Image: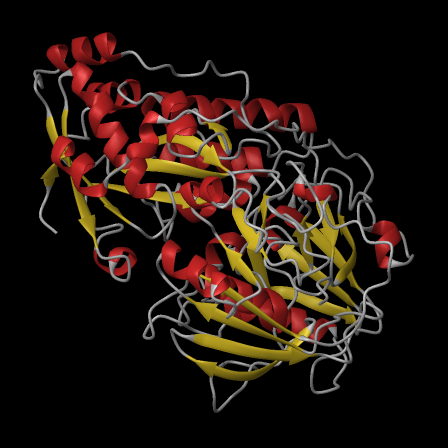
Amino acid sequence: MSPVPAARALAEFSLSPFSLLCSALSHIPYVYKELSVAVFADKDPQAVARRSLLKGAFAGAVLLGVPGLAGCRSSTTADAQSVSPRRGGNLRVVISGASSTDDVLDPHLAGSWGGGAVAKNIFDKLVAHDNDLTPRPRLAEKLEPNTDGTVWTIRLRQGVTWHDGKPLTAADVLWSVKRILDPGNKLPAAADLKMVDIAASRAVDDNTVELRMTQPIADLGALLAGWYVYVVQNGTNAFDRKHPPIGTGPFRYDSWAPGERTRLVRNDRYWEAGKPYVDSVEIILAAEADARLNVLLSGQADIVHELSYVQAKAQRGNQALTVHASPVGTFHSFNMLIDREPFNDPKVREALKLAVDREAIVESVFFGYGEVGNDLYGKGAPHYAAAIPQRAYDPDKARALLRAAGKENLRVTLHTADVTPGYVQSALLFAEQAKKAGITIEVSKSAADSYWSDVYLKQPFTQTGWGSYALEWFYGQALLSDARSNETAWRRPAWDRKFATARGTLDPSRREQRYAELQQELWADGGYIIHSYAKWLDGVSPRVHGFKAASVATDDWCSYRDVWM
């Protein structure tokens, strides 16, 4: 689609919801807990789920239309059941995913939401994040650093078996790290673990791994909880129909139609006693939000992930689904490649940051399911610099900056697509807001199925969103000079060195200060316009029980081990 003026685009997309203001939802602040104790106790996994891991390692909804219930209340209390979960049933979920050529079963490569959902249920990680962004033990019972963070010892949970009956061992962990780091594989998780010296690492015994670092690391757990860092079976390199994936997760692979759907069946050897409950899970891919909702409303799905915010509002009172909102939002941003004209001028970047009315976007696009962003990743995460002043909408100052830069009457093209609810609407509203600063933003809408391959990282002004993880993880993925997803062209070797120092600082207060300095530089000079943190919304049929509202990429997100029918 060729660029269209924002005014015409507003008419084309019929965004009458922009004129509506809904009551903002109540938000519960999620504060990352500074942890000073260093181990998982050797007890039942449920008892230790919120226990701290290691010294310094992790320091630093509305209920709609459920039969028999009136009014609205938080979905987090909606499924308190007086009866015990029962086994049986076939769960069908629909989520956005990759094209047939990009859809993969390799958990170290699966970057789409749909790919992540499949990986989450076949495989498992050593450590994951809870919904409040505190650590949750998975395959690791204990992580422990030496005195300077250069050697980490990992003790594995005993009694875990692979889908083929083989026991989980230290060799599997070492193989997984080695595979991730192999430069020939070009895996995105290599950015997470590149400080691991795999040649010097070893298996102490079948249940204990010793990982040696090339530089001090204060919080290895935050990196092991990264999106791609799953444990795969020793020696495994192929994941496809001829080589079905074998994991330790709650479900086993059954069938796969790339770009369409994946079917999983219950793993009766799963290490969490009694789980999962359903016999099978079918994960259906649909790129468009309307298509996803229609699959559920037509009775062909039981859960729809990533509802749009307009849909959530429109479905109030519909007894066919309950809307669940995540505790922590995903960030929504406009990304400027700062090595490309006109975004290589700091005054232009600052002007564009001042030309967006964040509060209006949260209310008019996300209908209160979110909160404003401040051009920084990690709201609610450890080390997030909440003390940096909130950047406000100031079109007069933006106009003055452009005048000083010799860029009055600036014209730019913002590339968008319906790949995530709110992208197109935010882009169009931003274009209207920027007019007060004398900025013309032409909105170019691309096809949803080709946006990530043909537009993202290629065009100088685009959109993206990331789930809530540790800053250590995100910086390695998107902000280091050699980051695979450096979507703002932020390449500052001096900043990279400061980040390495911060990541290796074991003293919590000094680490906090160093991360604050890193973020101050990003806030002042970076290429992100992070305007909002929007809740992830799921629509759930009343047939489904045990579903948990979860923040994107946390342990409960798209996990079906607790769901029953």
Q: Residue at x 57, y 59 (%)?
A: 197
Residue 192 placement (x, y as % from top left): 52, 53
Q: Quadrant of residue 372?
A: top left
Horizontally, residue 77 falls left or right of residue 331, namely right
For residue 415, side relative to residue 541 (left or right): left
Where in the figure is residue 120, as x and y percent of width and height?
60, 64
Q: Quadrant of the C terminus?
A: bottom right
Measured as percent of width and height from the top left, residue 363 is found at: 42, 26
- Rendered position, 307 above or below 545: above
**88 in relation to 24, above or below:** below
Q: Where 316 sits versus 107, above or below?
A: above
Quarter of image, res 527: top left
Residue 366, can we see it?
yes
Residue 367 screen position, x and y as percent: 45, 32
Image vertical order of residue 349 relative to residue 306, above or below: above
Colour convention of the picture: secondary structure
